[in-house]
Amino acid sequence: MKTMQHSKEQNLEESFVPLLPASFRPAPALSEGHIHIWTISQRPRTSSDYALLLSKDELNRASGMRSPQLFDRFIADHGALRLLLSAYLDTDPRKLPIVANTYGKPALDIPHCRLR
């Protein structure tokens, strides 16, 4: 049973690989004293493309948006952020501990992590 569970989890992780733009993986090395600035110009066709990546807290915040356009933008932006950060950290984007900072902006909840 455990093997099936691992296989199912592995298939879920592999299903997100096509969502990654080619320029995200592998992420370039981040050297001490350097910064990387990314812009995301292409949004997914529908917000549901990225909704599966978000945490319950992110989905709750998205549901409070005033318009469908803001909802879709929130989902797409937070999903793209998760994909990009997961490329740098080489992890499943759904498992990233992203929280809202005091200004409501997304932040990684990983002690001593250099990514901002």
Image: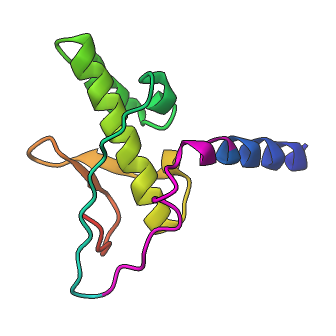
Q: Quadrant of the N terminus?
A: top right
Nearer to us in this view, 87 or 59: 87
Q: Residue at x 27, y 12 (%)?
A: 68
Q: Residue 114: x percent and y percent?
A: 29, 74
Q: Residue 113: x percent and y percent?
A: 32, 72
Left or right, 18 with respect to 72, comes to: right
Q: Residue 82: x percent and y percent?
A: 41, 48
Nearer to us in this view, 111 or 36: 36
Q: Residue at x 31, y 38 (%)?
A: 77
| Residues drawn in magenta | 15-31
Does 17 lie within the magenta span? yes
Left or right, 14 with respect to 112, comes to: right
Q: Residue at x 28, y 58 (%)?
A: 38
**Quadrant of the rendered structure where residue 30 is?**
bottom left
Q: Residue 15: x percent and y percent?
A: 67, 41
Left or right, 61 with respect to 110, comes to: left
